[in-house]
Image (cartoon, helix red, strand yellow):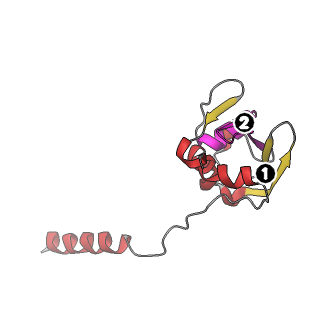
Amino acid sequence: MKSRILGLLGFSLLVLSGCGEKATISEFKVVSDSALVGKALPAIRQACPGLDKYSQALKNIRVQDNFRTSILFDVAESASIPDAYKVGGHTCYVEIDSTGKSIFIEKLGCKSLCLDQLNTPDGQLKIDLAQGATDS
């Protein structure tokens, strides 16, 4: 009898564990008139999974044209971003080459945020974007 009650209780907990609100899926969004940014953004989001994952901690997202077109954002001190990334309080730059086929990221913490991993390549991170996402 005891095992039957425990089995029923376990089954009930299993069924109820699937109930509740669905996790909110956030998306990294950039408001800009730049055609280059608009065209490259889907591929950037695909190459940098951390941008969507931590988008709620990314503030003051803007575009700046310098040597390259850059997407800039300020990273809030957030419990959702691993402390080991050491990116809270920094401004990150995601630079897009003129063809929209590659991005460049300099800061160590920003590279970790983009790739959503602690170990990143030394020096400037260059990521070639998915060709289908940026071709006309």
Q: What's the CA distance linking mark 1 and mark 2? A: 12 Å
Q: Is residue 33 left or right of residue 18?
A: right
Q: Amino acid type of disc 1?
A: Phe
Verify whether residue 104 appears in magenta: yes
Say which quarter of the image contains residue 1: bottom left
> Does 93 appear above or below 2?
above
Tag 1, which secondary structure? strand
Side (left or right) of 85 relative to 65: left
Q: Position of residue 58 (x, y in %)?
A: 73, 55
**Mark 1 or mark 2: whose residue is earlier in sequence:** 1
Residue density around tag 2, few if under 14, some if 14–19, many if 20 or more, within 10 Å:
many
The single residue placed furthest to the top in the displayed view is 122
Farthest residue, direction right: 66
On the image, numbered disc 1 is attached to which residue? 73
The reply to whether discs 1 and 2 touch (Cβ–Cβ < 8 Å) is no
Q: Is residue 129 above or below residue 55?
A: above
Q: Residue furthest front?
A: 136
Q: Secondary structure at mark 2?
A: strand
The residue sitting at 37% across, 70% down in the picture is: 17
Q: Which residues are magenta?
A: 91-116
Give whichever of 5, 10 is nearer the camera. Answer: 10
Q: Which mark is residue 105?
A: 2
The relative height of residue 103 versus residue 33 in the rendered view (above or below) is: above
